[in-house]
Amino acid sequence: MRVVSINRRTVERGALAAASGLLAGYTALAAAELTASLVRPQAGPVTVIGGAAIDRTPAALKDFAIRTFGENDKLVLQLGILVTVALLAALLGVFALRHRRTGAAGVLAFGVLGAAAALGRPDAAGPWDALPSLVGAVAGALVLYLLVGTVGGATARPAGAGADDTEPPAAWNRRGFLLAAGVTAIASTGAGALGRALTGRRGQGATASRTAVRLPAPASPAAPIPAGAALRIPGVSAFTTPNKEFYRVDTALVVPKVDADTWRLRIHGKGVSRPRSYSFAELLQRPLIERDITLTCVSNEVGGPYAGSARWLGVRLSDLLREAGIQAPSRGGRADQLIARSVDAMTLGTPVEEVMDGRDAMLAVGMNGEPLPFEHGFPVRMVVPGLYGYVSACKWIREIELTTFDSYDPYWVKRGWARRAPVKTQARIDTPKPFARIPAGTVTVAGVAWAQHRGIERVEVQVDDGPWQEASLAAQATTDTWRQWSFDWKASSGGHRLTVRATDGRGEVQTELRTRTIPDGASGRHGVFVTVG
Ligand SMILES: Nc1nc2c(c(=O)[nH]1)N[C@H]1C(S)=C(S)[C@@H](COP(=O)(O)O)O[C@H]1N2
Ligand SMILES: [Mo]
């Protein structure tokens, strides 16, 4: 009986120690959050460790994460970090039962790791960025040391270690522990909430600057969208994607909130005879172009959701480059790569030739009639028709540097993606959905197809292994936008496979060759299985 009672007390102590560890971890994160709100929200430990993890994730794993978790991938990553911190904290708590000082020192060691991650971020603002992790760790270590102290340092010897050993009196008292733990939990929750509130207030200047923006009318308006560009078939992607539904792909765990009033864009580098810097107001005073352009992500699987079309308003990028004295490489310009840098230290590399070949490459300030949403790059982002987002669409841009493909690899290229990446021709079946059950009779098969800057000339549908049949095309708004299509299918009972393929404006049929998204975008044809009857 006695042995059993010793074990129970040991287990009880262990549980309380683990709880102490959890509380210490919670306190550490809360204190770090509060400190980060004063220093820089992006310097918080979860954000810097998450950022470091994103940067080190192999392309294949990142692809898997995007495929599996979609736009929730960042949430999953952050939850993963929290679960890991909780596990480590609980373990440290149990460990601290026997080695109180070393346990507390362990918390400090994790703080040092967090601080190192903070200082190693490409957008680190300075030594202060280490502070959130360090302050959090000190608070966490103190909590662990004190709470485990109330649980009692020495544990009972292992069962059976000697029947005559009297068990040490329970050094902890349940009430004392609960009181200390309760106070800690409340204080930490308060600190965390205060931190979040302060972080929210930091973004107020940026929010106010966005609210104050009055977008000027374009000097060169977009051509009206032809009435026939939208087929109005239920289930087909809207021709213009509302901002709230527009896909979002980036590495930012905290959406940058940039104050447009202090924002500036610098243009410099190879072949720049007149380095330039522009304020947001200066950009708005220039003649603006307005264009419908479909944006697609290189991580989009065949049939995937990472494509969207918007009406962009912005400054023609080639105008700014010419002002800086830059020539296209085909005209003897020395720089063939344009590196766009964002406020969060992302780098994207775009071919100068494409930007200057007459297409509507722009520094966008407006998206569907409003200033860019923060998630989509406020105050200014790049948009280049015909190129995947990762080689063109820099959000929260702050700098353009002219260089060469030989001398510099931007962020994604360092991680295995191609230096140059024109958008591949794709057609997508939006309706019926994969594995849908539909009644026999006439079924409208419909979706969108895109081959930006080449245009879509033709879309065909194949039922099972039958012949390719011509789909009807909606009007083509511009070659830079996607095009809706539909096909009336006389569906007979049974299981069927529907496959679609597009032909671009140059007469090139979309390949059936299936490739992965890495290194330069997925190819292959979208198909869905459906059951009729
Ligand atoms: N600063 C920054 N800009 C960025 C990215 C990023 O991670 N950081 N991702 C790029 C990628 S991969 C794509 S596909 C587009 C997506 O733009 P959206 O989120 O507005 O749809 O933004 C591009 N611009
Ligand atoms: Mo992308």
Image (cartoon, rainbow, N blue to C red):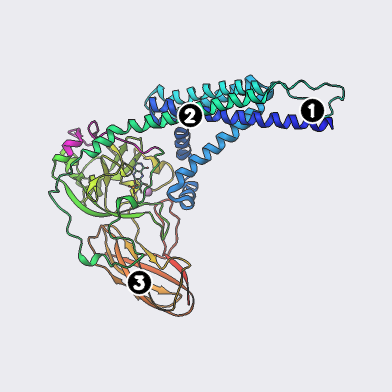
Q: Residues within 10 Å of mark 3 (few under 14, many from 20)?
A: many
Using the image, determine if residue 494 lies above or below residue 211.
Answer: below
**Residue beneath label 3, please?**
460
Q: Position of residue 308 (x, y in %)?
A: 32, 55
Residue shown at 52%/37% (left/top)?
A: 81
Q: Is residue 335 above or below residue 7?
A: below
Q: Is residue 487 visible?
A: yes
Query: What distance separates the C-alpha of mark 1 from that of mark 2?
Result: 36 Å
Give the residues in magenta.
254-283
Q: Nearer the viewer, mark 2 or mark 3?
A: 2
Give how far across and how far down residue 474 sits, in percent: 26, 68
Q: Is residue 482 above or below residue 86?
A: below
Would residue 362 appear left or right of 73 to someone viewing this image? left
Q: Is residue 59 left or right of residue 233?
A: right
Say above or below: 220 vs 79. Answer: below
Residue 65 placement, left or right of 176: left
Query: Residue under circle 2?
Result: 30
Residue depth check, mark 3 versus mark 1: number of the one nearer the observer: 1
Q: Residue at x 27, y 60 (%)?
A: 454
Give whichever of 59, 36 is nearer the camera.
Answer: 36
The x and y percentages for residue 247 are 36, 51
Which is nearer the N-term, disc 3 or disc 1?
1
- Disc 1 target residue: 158
